[in-house]
Image (tube, helix red, strand yellow):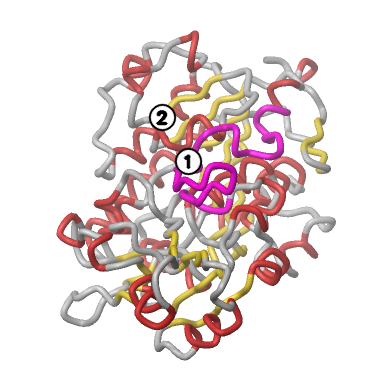
Amino acid sequence: MSTASVPTSFTANGRTYRPPAQPVVVVCVDGCANEYLEASLAHERMPNVARMARCGYRGLARAALPTFTNVNNAAIATGRPPDVTGISGNFFLDPETGEEVMMNASRFLRCETILAAAARAGRRVAMVTAKDKLREILSDGLQGIAFSAEKACEASPETHGIGDVEVLVGRPSPAIYSADASLYVLDAGVALVERELADFLYLSLTDYMQHTFAPDAAESLDFYAAMDERFGRLLELGAVLGLTADHGMNAKHTSDGTPRVIYVESLLTERFGPDVRVICPITDPYVVHHGALGAFVTVHLPDHVPAAQVARFLLECEGVTEVYDRALAARKLELPPDRIGDLCVLSGRDVVLGRTAADHDLSLLSGALRSHGGRYEEMVPMILSRPLSPRYAPLVAADPRNFDIFELTCNGGSG
């Protein structure tokens, strides 16, 4: 594509994007707490990221709460917080039906994506995810390429904008519980840029490795080195690259590996009686990652139980750090009020929240429990391959958000 034919700008959700003529690639490194980068850089395993940090920009940004995958991928893909996107978790109690459902259908998204707007403006857009659960919601309205590594073998031109993905990447669809699930996404991105099939890409990885291994584990260092090789290849192809994460990751267990869990529904049922419902918004099909245990839950109360009394009780529980009623959660946590409970509850750095012991099969965990969802997984890396212009320096010096990444990658470069 010649420079003259590339659209100069487009608007999505009140923001104007002015992408450069060369390929734009934004990567969500799922679960990438800054500690992982620090460990890999200290071991000199990420020379391309080190060069980006030196010649471009590296800092921290604040993710959307709760710090879950669907919430933050929707925010990144739209440039807006959850009270605009409508995505409050991976899983929620649908007020229209009273059913507990996965929030992965496009009907739950309340605003357009940057990807759809870019495609409408004439960019050749591709969205590649590791987990198939994100594909439908992030490809809403997109006239372009959209497929997952998990189900790459099922992609077809009619439904995904592309076929023969396994031929494109050069190997079969990966196991979702593997490092290759993320590397496959990056290899697909490289192939799409290399073959000029896309020039505006969003690549969303999976956090299996971060759930499983600590930052300084040999497996983590090897994984981050492998990712860095792919980042280097994208840079060699002339891409403008922006990296961020949907959330961080912390160990949620004692020194002997025992998970530190507060079963909130059990506590509240014992204290306030039956009919209390606790929803774990981290819930998704990938139970080996986290056992549906995260650092954020919502509480739905029967009419006769006062929310203020329950909030006071929960705040007295060791390991519970924050409790907000619906109105305060909507205002302070930027959440859609109709898609959360009467209370939102957050836990400490080394603690997770669950429903009852019977609702969580901890035998399915692939290792010691590492998870996310709360305040302590809120700060994530932000890395750009180009230095920031003076216009955007104040933004990153104040309160940058991970969902600023497309604007910074498209508009913020000074070189």
Residue located 30% across and 20% down the image: 170
Above or below, 413 relative to 326: above
Left or right of 240: which side holds 347? left
Residue located 53% across and 20% down the image: 145
Residue located 47% across and 83% down the image: 314
Instruction: Count residues near mark 2 (Cα–Cα under 10 Å), then give few for <14, some for 14-19, many for 20+.
Output: many
State the residue in front, 116 or 42: 116
> Residue 87, which numbered label?
none
SS for tag 2? strand
SS for tag 1? strand
The residue beneath circle 1 is 204
Query: Percent position (x, y) of residue 237?
Result: 53, 29
State the residue in front, 285 or 172: 285
Q: Estimate the spatial distance between the alpha carbons at disc 1 and disc 2, rounded to whole Å.
A: 9 Å
The residue beneath circle 2 is 148
Residue type pointed to by label 1: Ser
Q: Which residues are magenta?
A: 88-117
